[in-house]
Amino acid sequence: MTDTKDVNVEVRGEDIVITVPGTDHLVIYSKRDGSVELSARKLFGPLDFRVRAWTLANHKAQELGWLP
C-alpha cells in the first residue's frame, strides 16, 4: 500500500485527482477508453510530487479495475 497521509486521492467521474492540501500541487489523471494506462491532463507541482502522484493514481486505478 502506498502512503497517502499528506495527500488527497479522489475519484471524480472518469478522473483520479491527486492534491496536497494547503498547496497548489495538483495532478489529474484520466483513463481513455481502450487504453491500458492513465493519461495526465493537468500537472502542477514539483517533480517529486508528480512521480508520487503517478504511483498513487495507478494504485487507485487498479483498485477501481481501470487497469490490470
Image (cartoon, grey):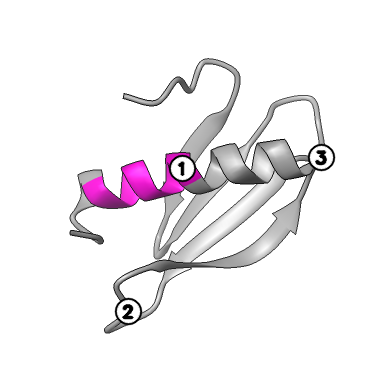
Q: Which residue is labeled 2 in the image? A: 35
Q: Which residue is labeled 3 in the image? A: 24
Q: Distance between the residues labelled 1 and 2?
A: 17 Å
Please name the amino acid that badge 2 sits on. Ser
Which callout, 2 or 3, points to the residue nearer the camera?
2
Circle 3: element type: loop
Q: Which residue is labeled 1 in the image? A: 55
| Location of residue 2 (image quadrant) | top left
Mark 1–mark 3 CB contact (< 8 Å): no
Q: Provide residue 58's location: percent of width, then percent of height.
A: 38, 49
Residue, x 25% and y 61% (percent of image)?
Answer: 66
Question: Mark on residue 11?
Answer: none
Circle 1: element type: helix
User: How many residues crowd mark 2 within 10 Å: few (<14), some (14–19), many (20+)?
Assistant: few
The answer to which of marks 2 and 3 sits earlier in the sequence is: 3
The C terminus lies in quadrant: bottom left
In magenta, the rendered stretch is 55-62
Q: Majority secondary structure of the magenta segment? A: helix
Please name the amino acid that badge 1 sits on. Thr
Residue, x 81% and y 40% (percent of image)?
Answer: 24
User: How many residues crowd mark 1 within 10 Å: few (<14), some (14–19), many (20+)?
Assistant: few
Q: Provide residue 42's location: percent of width, then percent of height.
A: 68, 62
Q: Provide residue 62's location: percent of width, then percent of height.
A: 25, 49
Instruction: Depth check: give the residue in front, 13 or 30.
Output: 30
Residue, x 48% and y 23% (percent of image)?
Answer: 4
Q: In this view, does 66 lie above or below 31?
A: above
Please name the amino acid that badge 3 sits on. Asp
Q: How far apart are marks 1 and 3 (CA)?
A: 19 Å
The answer to which of marks 1 and 2 sits earlier in the sequence is: 2
The answer to which of marks 1 and 3 sits earlier in the sequence is: 3
